Image (tube, rainbow, N blue to C red):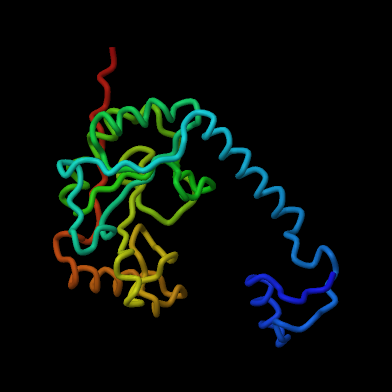
Amino acid sequence: MSLDNPPPEENEFLRLFGLPPTSQHDVPPDFFLPSPEEQKRRLAIETLHQRYLQQLDEYQSPGSPERHDYPPKEPNTGWKIHLNVDPKNVRTVSKFLKDNRFKHKFISGANLEQGKIFTVYFGSKQMAQKQIPIVSDHLDHLLEKPGDNDEIPVAPNIVARFDVTANLANNEFSARAYHQGIPLLNYASEDNLPQSLDQSKRQLSAKYGNYFGGTLTPYQPASTPSS
C-alpha cells in the first residue's frame, strides 16, 4: 500500500517516526489495523450499543431548573451522576427521568464500557445532595453495578463526579484524569494521587466555593423493615 496523502491519524503516526507526511511510503496492508484483541473489544462495544438502540434512540434532555442549577456562564461545570442500566430497563428509567424533568442524556457519546448509560446533571453540591435520593429511591431496583471508573459512590449503584468542562480552554484541569470524582489539574502528578487530589480540591474550592463543596455525602436509603 502506498500513502500519497495519508489521513490525519496516519500522518501523525508517520510524524512520530520522523517521516514526511506527504511522501510515499511502502506500508504493509495491515499496518494501521487494530490488533485482534482490539477488534474484538470494538465489536463487543458496538454489539452492546446496538442492543441499547433497539430499545431507545440516543437523546439529550434539558430538564427543568428545579432539578439543576448550572451557572449560565459555565453550563457544563458541576456535579453529575452516572447510571448503569440493562437494555431491558432503559425505557423505564428514561420515562422516570423525563417525567420528573431531570436534565440528562441517554448514551449520546458516553462510555458504554464504563457503564455510563444515563448521565444525570445537577450542578451544585446542594442540588446534587437534594436530587440524588429521589433518583436512588425510584430507580435503585433498576440499576446495575457501576462500571470501572474513578468516580465516587453517592448511593447504591450510583457514582458521581465534578466536571469543569467550561474551563478546559484555560488548561487548568484535565479532561480525562479524575480521582475520586475530582478532575485533576493538568500539571498534577499521578504518582502521588493524594497530594494531586488535595491540590485540585483546593483550586476548585477557591474558584467555586460551596457550589463545588469538596465532595458529596453518600445517600443511604432507609432499610426495608423485615416482615
Answer with the quarter of the image where residue 223 lies: top left
Instruction: Provide residue 168's location: percent of width, then percent of height.
Output: 35, 71
Answer with the quarter of the image where residue 181 lies: bottom left
Instruction: Provide residue 56's location: percent of width, then percent of height.
Output: 46, 31
The structure residue drawn at horizontal position 28% and vertical position 16%, both measured from the top left corner, is 226
Instruction: Provide residue 81's location: percent of width, then percent of height.
Output: 33, 47
Quadrant (top left/top right/bottom left/bottom right) for the N terminus: bottom right
- Where is 185 relative to 73, above or below? below
The structure residue drawn at horizontal position 36% and vertical position 42%, both measured from the top left corner, is 158
- Where is 170 relative to 29, above or below? below
Would residue 189 appear left or right of 81 to someone viewing this image? right
Answer with the quarter of the image where residue 43 lies: top right
- Where is 44 relative to 144, above or below? below
The structure residue drawn at horizontal position 73% and vertical position 53%, both measured from the top left corner, is 37
Quadrant (top left/top right/bottom left/bottom right) for the C terminus: top left
Closer to us: 119 or 197: 119
